[in-house]
Image (tube, helix red, strand yellow):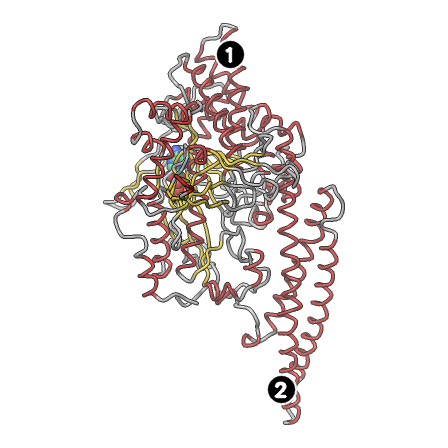
Amino acid sequence: MVAHVSDVVTLRERVASGSPSETFGSWSLSWQAIAERLSGDTAAAFEAFVLSGAAMSKDVSNAVGEVVLDWARAHGVTHFAHWFQPLTGIPAEKHDAFLSLKVGAHGAVSALDRLPGSLLLQGEPDASSFPNGGLRATHTARGYTVWDPTTPLFLRKEGNAPTLCVPCAYVSYTGHALDHKTPLLRALAALSREATRFLNLVSGSDSVTAVTATLGTEQEYFLVDRAHFAKRPDLLMAGRTLLGRVPSRNQQLEDHYFGPIPARVLAYMSEVEAELCRLGVPVKTRHCEVAPSQYEIAPIFESVSVACDHNVLTMDVMRRVAERHGLVCLMHEKPFAGINGSGKHNNWSMATDTGENLLEPSGERTRFLAVLSAVLWGVHRHAAVLRATVASAGNDHRLGANEAPPPIISAYLGSAIASLVEAAERGEKPELASGAPLAITEKLTVQLDATDRNRTAPFAFTGNKFEYRAVGSSENCAWPMTVLNAAVADAFRTLGDRLEAKLAKGLAREAAVLELAREALTESHDVRFEGNGYAGEWLEEATRRGLPVLKDTPAALGALREGQRTAFLVSQGVFSEEEIAARTEILGERYLKAIDIEAQTLSEIATGLVLPAIEAQAARTGEALEAFRHGGAKVSRQEERLHKLAILAESLLSAAGDLDKQRDDLFAGHDPEPGLRHASTAVVPAIARLRGLCDEAENLVGEALWPLPTYRQMLFPVL
Ligand code: ADP
Ligand code: MG
């Protein structure tokens, strides 16, 4: 049912009012806040646990548990849950009550609330029931959730069951990563280690002690009315519409982007924001996106691991709050054909322990150049694996579809940085042009940025950070972030070794760094592309340059099966070979299952809903024809229409039958590769054929007889 404005107002009161800065973080508890509530030695022991992984004694962990319990109880919380991110696409949580029983004299039982440190630190869920790529089996099922104290604990205040969520990593009994967080934490540690060494080699000091990667996620999404959603089996089952005619007006007037936000949507957005703000997610930006009913939310950037957790939490809150507003939040990369899909731009940079942004062009020039060269070298070297991290059945519809970057990893720098880099490549002294003021009227002046924007580049430099634009909207950013940070860590390691060798040969430091940057830029030259990534010529040019052109998920996953491509992940300690093989299998399986669900759903809709609609239309047209003939009217066009309906019904049945047949072969055989190839070369085209016929039917069947909410009704709701 559609929520009424008055309901929405009451719902809004769930999250009491208050400015964002007043309510920020009131439902979250950071490790620093826990430490503040502990006494001297205990606080120091806890800090050592968080910062250097030192083991805590039982007394210390119990004291931490008590602090957490007191805080949670003060918020009326009765349960806690280890909150983790298995490879299912959504977070997992198993709730336990704080309830504990104490048996006293003569067996008298009393109840009390407890949170022993051991339960806070570690949980033990069954690992065989989550995707594990063969790493676990039902008879070897043990897995562990392990508290990651660097992301604040938070409260889930859903319904009458407020729950304390404990952000965790999740591994098997053998220590294999079964989640998104474990490899991400390993990659960030690798980046910090390699970047610290590299920067100190560049500066000839030991002033840098740690490097943190930073991430700000721009999350795009669609909102549809729950009543419409409920009548679309395709949205329910597959998360995207599998049929539907694009309405006459869609996005061609370019009037939705940054347009006025409808009141009902704004009520939804502000409730999402108020809740996220309390959860400690620094949400900042909201706006209408390019497609009708498409929107965006973006936070202020944070450290990568916290930002990844916060993005997962954001998606979760967005889905839940939508329910309260009679809406459904669609995160799929392409919910509607023919209009823009949704991405999640990952704005990424790195900062020193003193908070200096390493990609700030106005920073120390030699260091900036060295860091930039290393990033480009890493992205060029590991482009294929980076490409694989944004591969999914959903994103296949988006990448390269004139709205998102093509499935080729290239980096855009913008004219000012490009000239700096080109000068360095020629061995000249790199100078940076700065943006200038430009008078646009007699009184108004605009301060130009040093670089323009390029919305077609998958990896675009935007001022003082890179924007990895190819990431899909439904994706967990931890996977692309793991590989990006590991790729850059590998670049710092390789280039650091070379720099060390140059210095050992007696080269002056500044000269050695410039020579190194020149080498790195020359070697990675091909990854730089300043042109229009949407243009067909880029595909040819990229192929000529030898860049990996991996057009869909099966092709992209192939890169993960080539040991020499993934070796850097192993040498940086991010994944073992077994973990990579398992992950590749899981990603392949997810792709196959997504295609299988789409194929089955579409076939059912075609035969169960569209065909009866064609038949009903034919019957009605037939009756009308009889009546018209009776009256002596000319009916040749109508006979033609009836004929078309008959042909369409026949073709539809045949295409649905063909799709069913193709679907049968998806999971044949043990080797997943033929299945993946079959999916992309036979099943996906069969889905497209059947869809084409359904959309033709929508043209021929009257709206009163059409069994599904149309694109027009869903995208242009009367709010
Ligand atoms: P756009 O103009 O590209 O749409 P937005 O303002 O929507 O940009 O989002 C830009 C994102 O980049 C924000 O999340 C912002 O916090 C983030 N960002 C800014 N600086 C950095 C940085 N140094 N590292 C990572 N992310 C950053
Ligand atoms: Mg934006």
Distance in Å between CA atoms under marks 2 and 1: 87 Å
List the single residue furthest toward the right.
Answer: 669
How far from the left and from the top, in percent, is residue 275? 35, 49
Say left or right for 443 vs 652.
left
- Residue drawn where x is 42% and y is 33% of the image: 117
Residue at the disc numbered 2: 624
- Residue farthest toward the front in the current orientation of the protein: 106
**x, y percent for residue 84:** 49, 40
Q: Which mark is residue 25?
A: none
Q: Which numbered disc, 2 or 1, marks the residue that appears first in the sequence?
A: 1
Can residue 415 be seen here? no
Residue that label 1 marks: 500
Q: How many marks?
A: 2
Q: Is residue 521 above or below residue 170?
A: above
Q: Nearer the viewer, residue 39 or 214?
A: 39
* Callout 2–callout 1 Cβ contact below 8 Å: no
Quarter, ligand 1: top left
Depth order, front residue of 713/584 = 584
701 is higher (above) or lower (below) than 590: below
- Which residue is outermost to the left? 443
Image coordinates of residue 558 in percent, x first then y, are 67, 37
Residue 699 in which image quadrant: bottom right
Q: Quadrant of the C terminus?
A: bottom left
Is label 2 in a helix, a strand or a loop? helix
Residue situated in front as seen by the camera: 478 or 335? 478
Vertical comparison of 64 with 270: above or below: above
Left or right of 472? Residue 563 is: right
From the image, which quarter does the N terminus lie in?
bottom left
Going by the numbered disc 2, the residue's amino acid type is Ala
Crowding near the residue tagged with mark 1, few <14, some 14–19, many ≥20 C-alpha atoms within 10 Å: some
Residue in view at x 66 percent, y 59 percent: 600
Regarding residue 648, the answer to whether it shows in the image is yes
